[in-house]
Amino acid sequence: MDQITNKLNQILDYLQDPGSGHHSGDKKICYLTFPFEKILIAKKYLSTLLGLAKHRNYDVDILSLGSVVNEFIINNPRRNNWLAFSRVEDQFEMQAFFRGISSSVIENEVIETAILNKQEELQKNNNPLLLITDLEGIHPLTRFGPVEQKIYNQIEIPIIVLYPGDLSGSSLEFLGFYPPDGNYRSKHF
């Protein structure tokens, strides 16, 4: 998976010398894109990615969005209702089930809060870097673009997002089947 390693090195170079006036905005938020078929391979390379960042003196920590959403669902008071509802076989009821969980995740700003809390924790370190993983864990509840838009002005540390999807020009295609989204203000690799 040399391609992922090369992209990470490019991102780390960029974070050390971001330049100014880039069209992607002024925050150090970078997306390391890879084909969604390579999700498991990317996970296998996570320790390599951490090692590369630590070698460049970053105090790096990981935030798994899949774990964030899973914990929210497990600890939610509505969980018993969701469990009963999840056994339905009708397509429309299943869609309503996912819409209910999705709206709860979005309204409670579960993902945004987790990222900002992790940032606050990491800001105590000398050279913090947040690595966000498991974006596929937020599907079909939400996409990451709206999350980034909500918290963009509050980001104060470098963030690398492992993004399972395709880079199409300046747009990102989450998981390779969502339509291209050009509303990201971050830098894409």
Image (cartoon, helix red, strand yellow):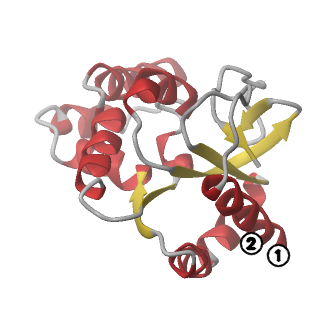
Mark 1 surroundings within 10 Å by alpha-carbon count, few (fewer than 14), some (14 through 19), many (20 or more):
few
Q: Residue furthest left?
A: 77
Seen at 24% across and 43% down, the residue is 72
Mark 2 surroundings within 10 Å by alpha-carbon count, few (fewer than 14), some (14 through 19), many (20 or more):
some
Seen at 25% across and 51% down, the residue is 71
* Residue 56: percent from left, percent from top: 57, 75
> Callout 1, which amino acid?
Asp
Whether residue 90 sits left or right of residue 33 in the image: it is: left
Can the viewer see residue 94 in this picture? no
Whether residue 150 sits left or right of residue 33 in the image: it is: left
Q: Do the residues labelled 2 and 1 touch (CB within 8 Å)?
A: yes
Q: Which of 7 and 143 is in front in this view?
A: 7
Give the residue pinned by disc 1: 2
Q: In which quarter of the image is residue 109?
A: top left
Seen at 42% across and 47% down, the residue is 157
Give the residue pinned by disc 2: 5
Quadrant assignment for the N terminus: bottom right
* Residue 148: percent from left, percent from top: 50, 30
Q: Distance between the residues labelled 2 and 1?
A: 5 Å
> Callout 2, which amino acid?
Thr
